[in-house]
Image: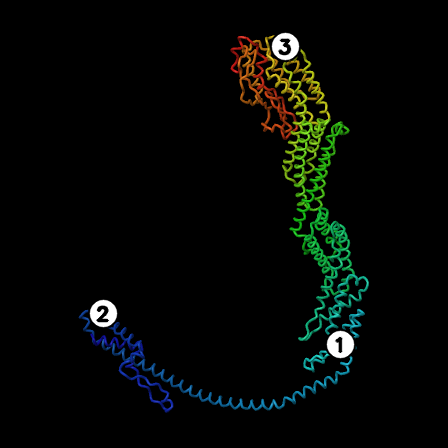
Amino acid sequence: MHTVAQRSAHFACSNLDLCPHSAPAPPAMDSAARDKTQPVLPTGSSCPGPEWPEQEKAEQLARGAALKWASGIFYRPEQLARLGQYRSREVQRTCSLEARIKSVVQSYLEGVKTGVWQLAQALEAVRGAHEALGQAHGLLRDMAEAAQTLEPLREQVVQHKQLQALSQLLPRLRAVPAAVAHTQTLIDAQRLLEAYVSLRELEQLQEETCAPLGGLELPVFEGLGPLAEALGQAVEAAAGAAGQLARKDPALLVAAVRVAEVDAGRSTSLEQAPRDWRQRCLRALQQGLERVHFRTSLQPGPGALAKWLEALRVALPAELAMAEALVAPCCPPHYKVVQLWAHTLHDGLRRCLQQLLEGPELEEADTFTLLHWALHVYQGPEMMGSLELGPEADVSDLEPLLTLENIEQLEATFVAKVQAKVAQWLQKALDGEVVEWGREQEPDTDLSGFYHSPLPAIVLQILEENIRVTRMVSVSLQQRMHGMALSELSTFLRSFSNALIRFSRDHFGGEAVVPHYVPYLLATLNHQLALSSSVSVLQPEWVVPGVLAPVEAELDKLQKRICRLVLEALLAELQPLFAALPSRRWLSSPELLDDVCERTARFCQNFRHVRNPAVQLLLVEAERTVVLQYLSALMQGRLVCRGADERTQAAERLQHDAAQLQELFLGLGLEESVQCVPVLLALKELLNLRDPTLLGLEVAGLRQQFPDVRCEDRPGREETQEGLGGANTPVTQQRGSRLRPPGPARRRVPRAAPGRTQLSAGRPAALAPSWSPSTFQPRANTCTLGGLLLPLRVLCLTPDCQQNKVTSPYA
C-alpha cells in the first residue's frame, strides 16, 4: 500500500510538471559563447523550498489524492490480488510522462538559446549605430559653424534684392501720394467707380512692393487704409439714400452697388481683413429706409397718432411701389429689393409701435385708432394686402404688428377709459334729468300726449354706439365693450332708483317740495318702459341668451320702486278721508266716499300720460290701494250696528260704495276682469245676515272662496269695547295687523325708506305692488280679502243681543 501511494504521488507530480527528479540534463553546446549563456538548472534530489513554494503544496495535494484513490481501490482484501497489474500500468504511465516532460524541456531550452543569440547580435548592431550617430553629430556641428560665418553674406544678398526691386518700382512709388490725393478727389466728387479702380491699383502696387520686401510696409502706403474707409463710407451713404437717388441720380446708386459687389468678389490676402462692403451696403439700405419713415422726430405725440398712421397708410405703399419700379433695377437680383423694403418697413414700424406702447398710456381715441389700423388697415387691400404687391415682397411670413399681449392690453385700456367716460356721461344725463324734476311746469309730452324725455334715448345711444363702433376692430373688443355697457346700464338704473328715493324723501320731508311730484314720477315710469322695450338693441346676435337678465332685473326693480312711490302719493291724499270711515255720517250720506272718488279720479287723471301696459298696472294697484284702505277703515271697529236696520243700511252703503268705486275705475280705463271691488259686495252679504250665529259659517265659506288671501297678524292685546255683548266687555282685538296681497312674499322695508307707508297704530301698512317681475300684465281677480272679514264682526253684530253670546268659534 505504501509503495502504490508513493507511485501515485509521483505520477501526480509528473502531471503538474513540478517534479525536478525527471528533468533531463542539458545537451552539450557547440560554441563556448553559447555555453556561457546557458542557464544552470537545479540538479538536487528535492526542490528548494523558498524558490518553489507551489511545489510543496502541489506535492501534498498529489499525495492526498493518491492515498484517497488507493484506499478506495484496495479497500477490500480481494483487490490486493490485482496489485501487480496496477504497478505495471503505473510504471508504464510514469515512463511516458517522463519522456513527454523531457521533450518539452528540451524544446524550451533550444528556444532560449536562440533568443539569447539574437539579443547578442542586436546589441552589436546598436553599438555600431551609436558610433555612426556620434560621427554625424560632429559633422553637423561643424556645418553650423560654417553657416554662421555666411550669415552677413546672406543679409547682403537680401538687401541687394530689395534694393533691386525698389529701384524698379521707384517711379511708381513716387506717384503714390499723387494717386492717393486723386482718389480722394474722386471720392469727394462721388465718382465711385473711378475711385475704386484707383484704389485697387494702389493696393496692387502695395502688394507688389510688400512681396519682395518680405512684408515690410513702406510709409508711402499709410494713407491707403483711411482712403479705403472713405470710399466705403461713400458707398454706404449712397446706399442709405437709395430712395432719393433712385429718383434723382440712379447712376450714383448703381455705381455704389457695383463697387460693393466687385469688392465682395475680390480675393484678399491673409494679412488683409475683408471689408464686407456688401453687408454694409444692405445695412445702409435698411437704416436709410427706417430713418426716412421712423426716426424719433417723426414719432407721434399725444393726440397725433391718427394723423401719423394716416400718413403711413399713404407713404408705405408708395415706398414699396417706388422700390419695385426704381430701386430694384439698380441692384442685383439677389438683393431682393422689394422683399428687403417690405420687411424693413414692417420691422421698423413694429419697433416704433412697441416703443409707443412702452411710453405714456394712450388716450382712448388713439387706442381705438391704433387697434383698427393695425388689425384692419395695415393688413387690408390698401397696404400689405394690396393686389399690386407682387409675390417677390413675400409678406406672408411677417410677424404681426401687435402681439396678443399688446392687443389685450390695448383693449383693456380702451374699455376702462371708455367705461369711465360713459359713467360720467350717464351721471351727467341723470343729473340733468333730476334737475328737470323740480321745474314749475309739468313734464314734456310727445305727439301722443305721453310724458316724454330724451334720457332713455341718450342712455341707449351712448351704450349702443360704443358697442357698434367696436365691431370695426375685433370680436373680443366688442365682447368686452358689451359687458361694460351692461354693467354701466345696471349701475345707471341703480343710481336712477336712488335718485328717485332722494327725490321722494326731499319732497315728503319738506326740504324740496315739488309742484309736479306725481307727473314726474309717471314720466320716469315711461322712461323705464322705453328702456325695457329698447334694451334688446344692446344684445348682438352672438350673445348667448340670458346675458340681459341682470339688466332686466334692475329694470323690474326700478318699475316696482316707481309704482310704490306713486301709491305712496295716493295714500298721502286718501288717508285723511278714510279716517272718518266708518261713521254715522258715512251711513247716512255718500259725501265721504264722493270725496275719496273725486280725489282718486283727480290723482289718476295723470295716468293717461303713461304708456301701456304700465297704465293698467297703475290702475290695478290704485284700485287695490283704495279698497284696502276702505277695508282697513272698516276694521277699526269705530262703528257698531245697533240692529238689523243699521246692518241693512251698512250693507246698502257697502253696495253703493262698491258700485261707485267700480264705476270710478271703469271710467279711468281699468278692465273689469281685474277689479277687486267685489270684496265690498261680499261684506254686504254678511251685513244682510238675519241670524248672526251663521257669521262664522259664512266667513269660512268666504275663506274657501278666496284661498289666495293671506293675513299675518301680530299678537293682539285686550281692549274694552262698548256695545259688544254688554258694556265694558273685554274682547281680544287683533291690532297692528299687516296684510299681504296675493303673490310672492316681500321683505319689510325700514320705516323711513320711501316706497313704504307706515300708517298709525292699528292700521295695515301700504301694500307693495304685486306684479310678476317677468311681465307687465296685471294679475287676475284674486284680491278679495277673506282674511279681513273676521274683524268686521263689530260692524255686523247688534249689542245686547242674546244670540251674540253663542256665535261661531271665531267670536
Three-letter amino acid code at the position of disc 2: Gly
Q: Position of residue 302 (x, y in %)?
A: 73, 50
Determine whether 598 is above or below 347 in the image: above
Q: Which mark is residue 201?
A: 1
Question: Reading the chain from its start, which is encountered first: label 2 or label 3?
Answer: 2
Query: Which residue does the image show at 61% across and 89% down from the upper left?
Result: 148
Give the label, 1 or 3, closer to the camera.
3
Q: Which mark is residue 72?
A: 2
Give the label, 2 or 3, closer to the camera.
3
Give the label, 1 or 2, closer to the camera.
1
Query: Which residue does the image show at 25% across and 75% down from the upper left?
Result: 8
Q: 464 or 100: nearer the eye? A: 464
Q: Is residue 610 visible?
A: no
Q: Residue furthest left?
A: 77
Rendering colour mode: rainbow
Q: Position of residue 337 (x, y in %)?
A: 74, 61
Determine whether 284 is above or below 595 in the image: below
Three-letter amino acid code at the position of disc 1: Glu
Three-letter amino acid code at the position of disc 3: Gln
